[in-house]
Image (tube, rainbow, N blue to C red):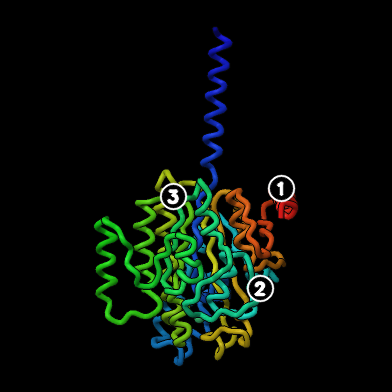
Amino acid sequence: MKAIIITSLFVVYLQFLSAQSKSTAPNIFVITLDGFRWQEIFNGADPGLMANTIYVNDTAMIRQLYGGETAVTRRQKLLPFFWNVLSKEGQLYGNRAYGNQADVKNFYRISYAGYNEIFTGFADWRFIPNTPRFNKNANLPAYLNNLDEFKGKVAVFSSWNIFPYILNEPANRILVNSGYEPLSSNEPTIKKINQVQDSISSKSACRYDMLTFLMAKQYTEQHHPKMLVLSFGETDEFAHSGRYDMYLQRANDADRMIASLWYSIQSDPFYKNNTVFIITTDHGRGSKTNTWPAHHLFVKGSGEIWMALMGPGVEARGEIKEPGQIYQNQFAQTIVGLLGEVFAPNHSTGKPIVLQNAATEKKQDTFVSVRVATK
Ligand SMILES: [Zn+2]
């Protein structure tokens, strides 16, 4: 009798373990700041640009807000979440002062090409301009949405209205809420956000980031997506119009919104300690005083990016100060690796990044070779 009880307890325990392991794939939030430079991530606001009246309306006030003697002071002022939280709990790649380089692999250094590279793991050599054209490349959000564990649990919110094309929303049947598109819902807050959006008279291709954020946050609280993409767009918009003051303020706003999202998910049992944030950008920009507003094939610096991440599976190493090289086409497989899934589309992909984890480096090497063998 005793043996039967012990055996059945053991069976229950095994079932419990397998149920646990089924639901332990972490949640993943991919957050992007369009065209935000690594220079501002690691050095804060640029003193020369802050003092330049071509790009800044009130140079004294901008200096008051984001100025400082050292890069460390300035970056902490501009991006408090990155430098007070993320740098303590996660990892930041791309500070070229240490020879730590992050670059896009694609040739074009524009947004469509960059988001395609992030979400498909493939630096497409074919040129697709930043226009509404459906992307044929298999992407990670769509792939995850087809797995049992992620089905109906993938949601994309972007300020830029080209995202439904880049991720091919109709073919992939994933939720992509972009630009000023309303979100169909009976929930009162979402309905209110729809109304506010509707009331905006001059709608550009890029929604206000705050609206994108509110929509994403509200949806997340109610529906608990396991993969959320949140893509901010205003940094790029203001950079193109040469407004360094607004570019800085939008980045500062984005930092605060990311902080608020992190706080709210860490206070939610569904997400708490089981959610990875990966934050990056689609492309760099010019590195000089007169080239920073632009980015494309011929502007030096346009391919230079950065990437930050934190959450389970990411050791707290902070800013990576060792020489190294990562590429944008590695992000998709890095995410897949953190989720413990396999993404094998019919195009090539960059290998997962070997995260700077002393204990897991060996394990990851094994993982890479296993995956290569399955392709
Ligand atoms: Zn741009």
Residue sitting at x 54%, y 86%:
294
Residue 235, numbered label: none
First in sequence, mark 3 or 1: give its number: 3
The residue to which callout 3 is attached is 266
Instruction: Name the amino acid type tagged 1.
Output: Lys
Asked if 129 appears above or below 186 in the picture, the reply is: below
The residue to which callout 1 is attached is 363
Q: Quadrant of residue 37?
A: bottom right
Mark 3 nearby-residue class (10 Å; few <14, some 14–19, many ≥20): some
The N terminus lies in quadrant: top right
* Residue 193 seen in this snapshot: yes
Residue sitting at x 62%, y 76%:
304
Instruction: Name the amino acid type tagged 2.
Output: Lys
Query: Residue 201 at x, y = what percent?
Result: 27, 80
Q: Is residue 356 left or right of residue 18?
A: right
First in sequence, mark 3 or 2: give its number: 2
Residue lying farthest to the top in this orientation: 1
Instruction: Name the amino acid type tagged 3.
Output: Gln
Q: Nearer the viewer, mark 3 or mark 2?
A: 2
Identify the secondary structure beneath mark 3.
helix
* Alpha-carbon span between mark 2 and mark 1: 26 Å
Q: Is residue 188 left or right of residue 373?
A: left
Q: Nearer the viewer, mark 2 or mark 1?
A: 2
The residue to which callout 2 is attached is 105
Residue sitting at x 44%, y 56%:
262
Identify the secondary structure beneath mark 2.
loop
* Alpha-carbon span between mark 3 and mark 1: 28 Å
